[in-house]
Image (cartoon, rainbow, N blue to C red):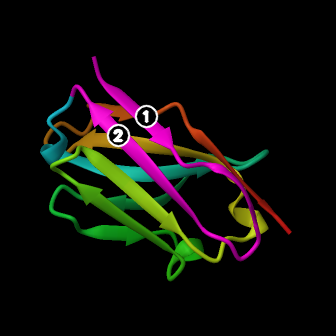
Amino acid sequence: QVQLVESGGGLVQAGGSLRLSCGASGINFSIYNMGWYRQGPGKQRELVADITSGSGTNYADSVKGRFTISRDNAKNTVSLQMNNLKPEDTAVYYCNAQNKYIRTRAYWGQGTQVTVSS
C-alpha cells in the first residue's frame, strides 16, 4: 500500500518561513520523481517544484529564489523549504510521486494547508 504523508503546514505571517515534509512508504523511493503541487482557493492545482530521482530540480517562476526542494533517499522523504512567504502562497500543498519508468504510476498525498497572513 502506497502512502504519502505530508506535514509541516500551518499559519505564518508574510515574510515568514515554513518547511513541508512528505514521507513515502510502499514504493521504491529512489526511482520516483517527487513533486510539490498546490491548489489555492478557486484555483487549479499547479506545480510548485519537483525533483528527479537524480536530484535535478525545477521550480515554478513564482517561487524561484524563495523555495527549495530536496530529497533524502535514505529516509524516503522529500521536503520543501519555503522562505519569504507571501499571501498568494496560501494553498493546500500536495506531495506527488511519479515512477520515472512508468509515468502513469503516480501517487498523491492528502495535502497540508499553508496559510500566509498579510
Q: Please tell me whether residue 29 belongs to the stretch shown in magenta.
A: no
Left/right placement of residue 94 relative to residue 53 reads: right
**Residue 90 visible in the picture:** yes
- Amino acid carrying mark 1 in the image: Val
Residue that appears at 23% across and 55% down: 72
- Screen quadrant of the C terminus: bottom right
Between 37 and 6, which is closer to the camera in this rendering? 6
Q: Earlier in the sequence, mark 2 or mark 1?
A: 1
Disc 1, SS: strand
**Residue 100 visible in the picture:** no
Residue 11 position (above or below residue 15) = above
Disc 2, SS: strand
Across and down, in percent, residue 3 comes to: 35, 26
Q: Are marks 2 and 1 in contact (CB under 8 Å)?
A: yes
Between 1 and 7, which is closer to the camera in this rendering? 7
Across and down, in percent, residue 12 comes to: 73, 61
- Screen quadrant of the N terminus: top left
Magenta part of the chain: 1-26
Quickly name the residue at label 1. Answer: 5
Across and down, in percent, residue 34 comes to: 32, 50
Most distant residue in the top direction:
1
Quickly name the residue at label 2. Answer: 23
Left/right placement of residue 81 relative to residue 28 reads: right
The main secondary structure of the magenta stretch is strand
Residue 118 position (above or below residue 6) = below
Residue that appears at 24% across and 43% down: 76
Q: Which mark is residue 73?
A: none
Residue 29 position (above or below residue 16) = above
